[in-house]
Image (spheres, rainbow, N blue to C red):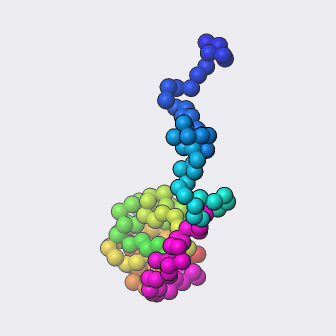
Amino acid sequence: MKLNELAPAAGSNKAVKRVGRGPASGQGKTAGKGHKGQKARAGRGPHVGFEGGQMPLQRRLPKRGFNNIFAKTVAIVNLGDIDACFEDGDTVDIAALEEKGLVNGGFDAVKVLARGEITKKLAVKVNAYSESAKQKIAEAGGTAEEI
């Protein structure tokens, strides 16, 4: 095979539509833009959502609620899930929880809740705990450390 024998795969290259090249081309005269109007002129057309001066849909619909841009996203993990995924004596931190698939990105903090039972002695290091979760971890012989 030589460089001059290389060619693109059949059907992968499509010819550009050449508009405004006379009546025989099928796209002559107005070049597919119709007759007059803002969209027939050179330059940019109307902005997205413009409805010809009619009140646009996004302005007609009522706006409700409030979006708190300062809200913190807290990932929740239950004690029963931690007990099922870790062995006795393990250290449970945010990286270990992500590795086991109990939490996944997009959070600001991790909180452990007391749902389920814990039977293993674990050293848990996350951002927050419920009071009953701390108590259950301590009763199982583990430690609950806030980071």
Q: In the rendered view, tell whether residue 35 sits above or below residue 132.
A: above
Snapshot quadrant of residue 108:
bottom right
Residue drawn at x 42%, y 71% as measured from the top left: 77
Q: Indicate left or right for 68 with 117 as reference.
A: right
> Residue lying furthest left in this view?
116
| Number of numbered discs on residues | 0
Snapshot quadrant of residue 72:
bottom right
In the foreground, 70 or 44: 44
> Residue lying furthest top in this view?
1
> The N terminus appears in which quarter of the rendering?
top right
> The C terminus appears in which quarter of the rendering?
bottom right
Q: Main secondary structure of the magenta part?
A: loop
Q: In the rendered view, tell whether residue 1 sits above or below residue 126.
A: above
Image location of residue 123, percent across then percent down: 49, 69
Q: In the rendered view, tell whether residue 46 sits above or below residue 13.
A: below
Q: Read off the magenta span.
A: 45-71
Image location of residue 121, percent across then percent down: 42, 68
- Residue 53 colored in magenta in the image: yes
Q: Indicate left or right for 55 with 114 as reference.
A: right
- Residue 76 colored in magenta in the image: no
In the foreground, 145 or 9: 9
Image location of residue 4, percent across then percent down: 66, 16
Residue drawn at x 45%, y 68% as measured from the top left: 122
Q: Is residue 112 visible?
A: yes
Residue drawn at x 59%, y 68% as measured from the top left: 47
Image location of residue 67, percent across then percent down: 52, 83
Q: Is residue 145 visible?
A: no
Residue drawn at x 34%, y 69% as measured from the top left: 80
